[in-house]
Image: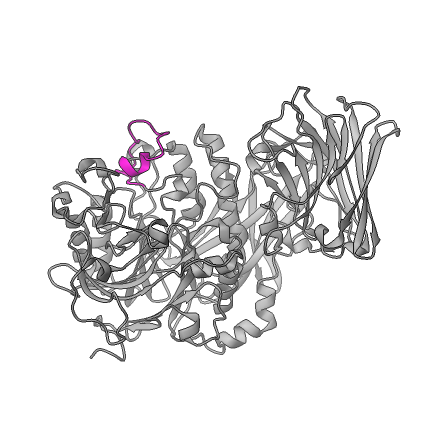
Amino acid sequence: MVDKPSTTRRTILKSGAAIAVLSGCQSTTSPTAAANTETKFSTQWDKAQDRIFVGGEMWANPMEDWIIKDGSARTRTSGAARNIQLITHQLSNPLGGFEMRASVKRLTSGKLDGGAGFRLGVRSDINDYRANAFANNGIIAGIHQSTLTLGSTSAQLKTSPSEETIHLAITSTPKGKQTTLTLTAEAANGDILGQVSHDVTSDDLLGNVALVHNFANGKKASDVRYAFEKWSVDGPAFTVKPERAFGPILWSMYAISDSRTAEGKVFKMSVLTAPMGEKDSKDIELQIKRDGAWTSIATAQLDTDAWTAVFRIPNWDSSKEYSYRAVYQMQNNDGTQTPHEWGGIIQAEPKGRPLRLAALTCQKDYGFPYEPVAKNVAALNPDLVFFSGDQIYENHGGFGLIREPADLAILNYLRKYYQHGWAFREVMRNAPTLCIPDDHDVFQGNYWGEGGADMKGDKTDKMASSERGGYIEPVKMVNAVHRSTTAHHPDFFDPTPAKRNMSVYYGDMVYGDVGFAILGDRQFKSGPEHVDTGEGRADHVPDDNFDTSTLDVEGLELLGERQEHFLTVWRDDWRGHSVKVLLSQTLFANTATHHGPDNNGLGMYLKGDLDSGGWPQTPRNRAIDIIRPTQCLHVNGDQHLTSLVQYGVKEQRDSTWSFCTPAISAGYPRFWRPEEVGYPHTDRPAHGLPNTGKYKDGFGNLVYVYAVGYPEAESMKNRYQVAHQKGSGFGLITINQKDKSFAIDSYKFLIDINDPPEKSQFAGWPVTITADGKVAGIET
């Protein structure tokens, strides 16, 4: 692989510059908190507009259930364990002492009262403030019916809580390795309603602190709802990092492309904010630094479904690097404004050197915040970053899935999607980024878009997305997903909406002397109900004796006519670039023989998976025939199984290569073990790795499998070690425009990128593919 001039991976990783890149956003204080003086934090919800966003210093669980209304934070549901985590302050030195205060007020009465108050020492297995935000543990401290509770100790209040405000205060007194906590409840008139003390091991306090509404675990609802006001913390026990604030601007993504028109190079940027209020400003200002001074270059309005503002600036001078910042003026209810900034670097377009593409896919949130991957990608300083889908899964962050109505489904999606930005915003702030959605992003385990069709039948059936084509979610929700991920992409090839006015996002990008095609593989794909796979799931063929050629029915689609036309035009258009790369959700092959955790973790055998890009066979071959003359590299993901495969149609190895990247955090396991089920093969590569060589996949497609990165048996509990064992990681492709070669790295999850490949990469990598489709250094 080739590094950028004047830097090496080692110097990048070890330098203070890398630490600065990863240190977070330097932002002004939001109006939801008073200015930090040493360790003090206090909300100012009394000055905030009514909105969903509770403040950049906090993360609400789940976001869509919380609102700021009439100067207080309150839930809109009675669900259990709703909480607001403080993310800029973390208890790291309990012996230093602290105090925490908040006011609570009953909004409703009822028989079931889940209580309200604090949690302390909320901590995950890695004690990362972002991971901690989703931990449901810690020491409870608050009111519950007529009881004041602190850990396992409780005392009766003098009077039962009414609809009047109660002030809660908790203080700590260190005693060696122990800490005495004291919780006091005070009436609005100053009367003490109750007080309780409890000794804890000081280490049990390490982690986040949070407000909690309804202390009950599980799904137990509460009839009683509370509002919170004036939350404050202070004391040397806290480590304070204001740069950890997340919002109102959450992150940005940008792309630059040669339009090959009078508009020249076109710069586009998406700026994403948290959901704001009706009276909040909807304007984002974009500034760049010229001659040492900030200059405003554009203003864009937020789309209030996706909460995304999109800038488009033609005739961009891509030969220069610019510092940029997006500025949002937060409206306070007293008429004042508080500015919030998010900034980074707009890179100069790479010229005269190879382009480095980081490729990532699939984020199962047991591995959140995926810091080993995020840090390694940032350290490699890529020229372009590609996320190929499944930025979320339906169970992301807990608290369930909302499918309808559309507005609530969108908020449910955005909350999950924000975890993606929270994990990778330091990468995206400085590097051009392309991001496409896949099935889980639109709340489907699989999807066969049928050109935007509405899924027929019972959408609540758990197997619906495996049985039928079309979309489960409302078009409004799908369009919000598209906008939040792809709105900053270069202008789409043909933006004409698909069925039911559903947006599309396929198109090209010319950058750094490379021509990229961007596809939505499954948006037009035919559903499995058009064929008969026998008994069981309609999308699975478990019977090795089943003739899968019968599934190649005339009229079925893979990419669809519109995307095939686009690929044909892209194939023939070489203006502004000398080498091509195809970016899409998944590979055009069925290179997984075993699926799932069954069979002692080895997976169940599937001859054919209709969700793969190997079906339908005829349109699969047609797509490969279209791109064959380009000798492009097809970069994709989705499979949770990294692979390097060369396509064949009429004969083995007669077309382009596919690099399927490792999952960032692999969930559902897949394996390629053809030898165990007797698949014949020829021409094993010189490295001699098992299950490699020339094969026919379960649908009869010709594939030359050069390398596959297998998961290991799980034996660890730490989330990062589990992700590593499950075959997680990321890919890096160095594109050499001069000799048209692709140097491909497939990195594991928990590694040091300075380690030798046999330790840091999956077996079979690194690999360089030459312009004539050969493996450099091995084939002539």
Q: Main secondary structure of the magenta part?
A: loop
Q: Is residue 201 visible?
A: yes
In this view, the residue farthest toward the front is 600
Q: Position of residue 120 (x, y in %)?
A: 71, 45
Residue 292 within the magenta-colored segment of the rendering: no
* Residue closest to the eye, 722 or 644: 722
* Residue closest to the eye, 338 or 561: 561
Specify start and end residues of the magenta stretch as a single range: 447-468
Query: The C terminus is located in which quarter?
Result: bottom left
Residue 448 within the magenta-colored segment of the rendering: yes
Locate residue 240: give its quadrant.
bottom right
Q: Position of residue 725 (x, y in %)?
A: 44, 61
* Residue closest to the eye, 750 or 164: 750
Q: Is residue 291 visible?
A: no
Q: Is residue 440 above or below residue 408?
A: below
Q: Position of residue 163 (x, y in %)?
A: 75, 22
Q: Position of residue 19 (x, y in %)?
A: 60, 67
From the viewer's perspective, is 276 left or right of 39? left
* Residue closest to the eye, 606 or 294: 606
From the viewer's perspective, is 719 left or right of 632? right
Locate residue 771: give its quadrant.
bottom left
Query: The N terminus is located in which quarter?
Result: bottom left
